Image: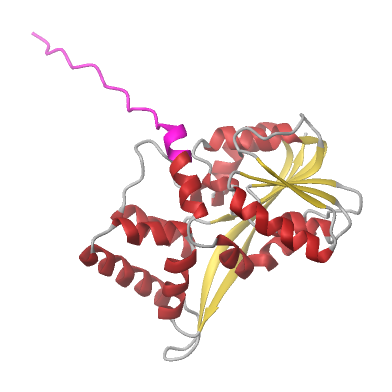
């Protein structure tokens, strides 16, 4: 007699609404604008790579404190930044006001952008929509917002880079919700092709390096555990012993990615993937 195999139990679907609520609280903690100020040049490079022109309508998704939207406005484009953390948008508005730039900022979700179909010439995201819980939905929204012949420009941390490895460390200490895909998958060209390829006339990838420069790896750790929401919340959720283990793992990682000689200032290499898509 042949044994009857039990039917496979499908894996539970992630509770995206609950995950998103937790993310909003996480990004509102600390002060992400201080972190974003360390990667302004990534947004400037991306806007140049996207060849943003004066008068272009530019949408920056998950804009945070506005780096890419402001970079576009500096080139006389008309920029809109969207993010689901109001506190960060307040910082973005202040920055645009100080520079007298044509940049607006609205509360909105990367998975349900508050814009009309095909209403932007350029759609960007710098280390932003890669954190959307429903990655395919966020990718679909990028395609929907961009006009035919327009450009989608993305900067995403790679899985094997410094930040991608840090996400993996966080996952060891605080496992993510079942079924949730790592944000660093956006730094994999094959994954982007699977999500966005159907709407792309062309897709070009360039690996670039973002340098994090500090007096020491200890200073880097203290900065991120104070101002970077995901790091801050990770330490809050761990007891003292596990927190010390996490700190040690981050310090070891920082030393491994430091390209400077030991016993001096550090310069950690954070690899990211710059992707330029021409919309069909």
The main secondary structure of the magenta stretch is loop
Q: Is residue 8 above or below residue 272?
A: above
Front-lying residue, 36 or 135? 36
Front-lying residue, 41 or 272? 41
Q: Is residue 10 magenta?
A: yes
Q: Is residue 97 above or below residue 178?
A: below
Q: Residue 198 sits in which quadrant?
A: top right
| Residue drawn at the location 21% of the way across and 66% of the way down | 241
Furthest-left residue in view? 1
Q: Is residue 84 above or below residue 68?
A: above
Tell me if residue 75 can be seen.
yes
| Residue drawn at the location 54% of the way across and 49% of the way down | 188
Looking at the rendering, the stretch of residues picked out in magenta corresponds to 1-20
Residue 174 placement, left or right of 34: left
Q: Is residue 188 magenta?
A: no
Residue 129 placement, left or right of 16: right
């Amino acid at each position: 007699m042949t044994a009857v195999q039990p039917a496979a139990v499908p894996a539970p679907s992630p509770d995206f609404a609950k995950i998103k609520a937790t993310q909003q609280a996480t990004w509102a903690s600390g002060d992400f604008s201080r972190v974003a100020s360390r990667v302004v040049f990534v947004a400037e490079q991306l806007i140049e790579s996207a060849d943003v022109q004066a008068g272009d309508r530019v949408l920056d998704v998950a804009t945070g404190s506005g780096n890419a939207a402001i970079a576009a406005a500096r080139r006389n484009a008309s920029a809109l930044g969207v993010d689901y953390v109001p506190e960060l948008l307040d910082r973005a508005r202040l920055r645009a006001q100080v520079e007298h730039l044509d940049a607006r900022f609205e509360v909105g979700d990367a998975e349900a952008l508050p814009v009309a179909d095909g209403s932007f010439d350029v759609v960007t995201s710098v280390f932003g929509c890669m954190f959307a819980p429903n990655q395919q939905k966020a990718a679909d929204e990028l395609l929907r917002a961009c006009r035919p012949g327009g450009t989608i420009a993305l900067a995403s941390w790679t899985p094997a880079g410094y930040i991608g490895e840090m996400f993996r460390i966080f996952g060891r200490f605080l496992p993510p919700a079942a079924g949730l895909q790592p944000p660093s998958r956006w730094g994999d060209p094959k994954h982007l092709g699977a999500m966005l390829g159907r709407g792309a006339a062309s897709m070009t990838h360039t690996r670039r390096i973002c340098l994090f420069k500090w007096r020491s790896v200890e200073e880097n750790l203290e900065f991120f555990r104070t101002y970077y929401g995901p790091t801050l919340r990770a330490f809050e959720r761990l007891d003292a012993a596990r927190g010390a283990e996490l700190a040690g793992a981050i310090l070891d990682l920082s030393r491994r990615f430091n390209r400077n000689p030991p016993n001096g200032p550090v310069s950690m290499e954070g690899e990211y993937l710059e992707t330029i898509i021409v919309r069909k």
